[in-house]
Image (cartoon, rainbow, N blue to C red):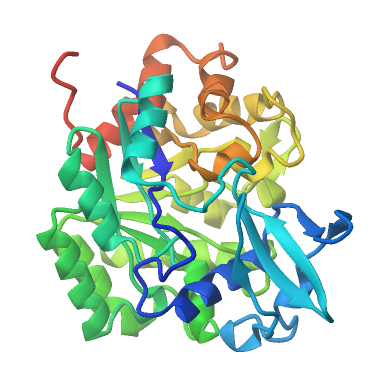
């Protein structure tokens, strides 16, 4: 079986995306785009632009979001206006006439390239996805495993604990937890703060998988990333039965040194923990700089295998966003067709077996 450990179904972004208001959803989107690698353009001339106007550089929380009439456009574009001029970020693929990816759309994509099962991640910008992910999993339980999402920094509050309980009742198997979500509250405390203890306790007691996306904010440098990751390590010291799925993998910009990784000991120790799996997911993060078939990624994948073993690696795509850079097929093929240093057993583990074991995904009936 082939399992995509990182994809999304999304409701039309013109609406609330499951949040209480459209304004909250728009703030998540605007904050996300302040640090995007997606291309930006001046709408009238088509010339390259940037997203610096979206956020006060001295205030990287939501309180620093500037009034730029931020809005959802068409053809994968997210739009804003500065000094009477319109700009847009090409965040989703151009052929996405409306920014939405319904359940049947992802199912069709999976069928076309031969992906058997998908883990549906979430994230505030994508929407408050607990209910929609549960809908997908309920409709096609043999095809989808959905994750719960909530306001990350407030995870220890009764409201967020109730959201976890809701997801458990709906049959969801894990938590999507993005450290950049802390920007909503100005990065008020670290991951290992005592205020979050009830959340970690609930995750462990209910055997939920922690799908953690580790940001480097608010400083957006290696020091910031290492601080968050090592804080997660301290959490896992206190709650050792939590199984972790590292979304987006290891950041090349900090630790990739040509054809190898150079990882500080304190960070490496977290990666090497038992029950800690790492995504292989280069097209979405580096597809704007590297060309298919992403030959720069091959030695890094080899080094990951040699450092951690194939049993700790899981393949993901980030559909539908990845089609901004390549097709869904290519996001799989750069591993399947070009990483010939992986033997058949290792390839099988990375493409499905490891993720199946982590999320308790059953073998398809006709296998």
Can residue 274 be seen in the rendering of this structure? no
| Residue lying at 25% horizontally and 47% vertically, measured from the top left | 136
In this rendering, position of residue 16 left or right of residue 175:
right
Front residue (pair 212, 367):
367
Q: Would residue 175 be found to the left or right of residue 282 on screen?
A: left
Q: Residue at x 42, y 47 (%)?
A: 101
**Quarter of the C terminus within the rendering:** top left
Q: Quadrant of the N terminus?
A: top left
Instruction: Kindly indicate the quadrant of the structure image that contains residue 199.
Output: bottom left
Q: Is residue 249 left or right of residue 292?
A: left
Looking at the rendering, which quadrant does residue 113 occupy? top left
Q: Is residue 73 left or right of residue 57?
A: left
Location of residue 290 in the rendering, given as x and y in whole percent from the top left corner: 74, 34
- Residue at 42 percent across and 27 percent down: it is 310
Using the image as rendered, state which of residue 219 and residue 53 is in the foreground.
53
Foreground residue, 10 or 245? 10
The total number of labels drawn is 0
Q: Position of residue 52 (x, y in %)?
A: 78, 72
Tell me where residue 315 sits by quadrant: top left
Q: x, y (%) of residue 341?
A: 56, 13
Q: Position of residue 89 (x, y in %)?
A: 70, 58
Q: Nearer the viewer, residue 99 or 153?
A: 99
- Residue 354, placed above or below residue 364: below
Single out the residue that lies furthest toward the bottom: 63
Question: Is any part of residue 303 visible from this angle?
Answer: yes
* 242 relative to 328, above or below: below
The residue sitting at 62% across, 47% down in the picture is: 263
Q: Is residue 157 above or below residue 95?
A: below
């Amino acid at each position: 079986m082939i399992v995509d450990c990182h994809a999304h179904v999304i409701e039309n972004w013109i609406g609330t995306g499951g949040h209480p208001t459209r304004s909250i959803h728009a703030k998540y989107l605007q904050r996300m785009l302040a640090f995007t690698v997606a291309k930006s353009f001046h709408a009238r001339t088509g010339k390259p632009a940037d997203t610096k106007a979206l956020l006060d550089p001295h205030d990287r929380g939501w309180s620093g979001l500037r009034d730029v009439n931020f809005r959802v456009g068409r053809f994968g574009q997210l739009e804003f206006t500065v000094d009477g001029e319109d700009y847009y970020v090409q965040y989703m693929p151009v052929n996405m006439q409306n920014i939405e990816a319904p359940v049947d759309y992802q199912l069709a994509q999976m069928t076309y390239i031969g992906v058997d099962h998908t883990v549906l991640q979430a994230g505030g910008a994508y929407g408050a996805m607990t209910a929609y992910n549960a809908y997908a999993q309920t409709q096609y339980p043999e095809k989808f495993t959905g994750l719960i999402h909530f306001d990350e920094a407030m995870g220890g509050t009764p409201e967020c604990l109730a959201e976890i309980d809701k997801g458990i009742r709906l049959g969801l198997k894990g938590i999507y937890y993005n450290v950049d979500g802390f920007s909503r509250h100005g990065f008020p405390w670290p991951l290992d703060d005592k205020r979050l203890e009830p959340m970690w306790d609930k995750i462990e007691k209910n055997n939920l998988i922690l799908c953690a996306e580790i940001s480097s904010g608010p400083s957006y440098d290696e020091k910031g990333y290492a601080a968050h990751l090592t804080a997660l390590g301290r959490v896992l010291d206190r709650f050792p039965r939590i199984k972790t799925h590292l979304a987006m993998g290891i950041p090349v910009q900090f630790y990739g040194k040509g054809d190898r990784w150079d990882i500080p000991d304190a960070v490496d120790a977290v990666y090497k923990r038992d029950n800690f799996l790492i995504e292989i997911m280069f097209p979405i993060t580096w597809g704007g700089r590297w060309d298919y078939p992403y030959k720069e990624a091959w030695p890094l994948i080899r080094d990951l295998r040699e450092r951690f073993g194939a049993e700790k690696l899981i393949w993901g795509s980030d559909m539908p966003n990845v089609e901004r850079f390549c097709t869904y097929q290519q996001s799989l093929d750069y591993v399947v067709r070009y990483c010939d240093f992986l033997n058949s057993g290792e390839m099988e583990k990375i493409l499905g077996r490891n993720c199946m074991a982590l999320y308790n995904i059953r073998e398809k009936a006709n296998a």
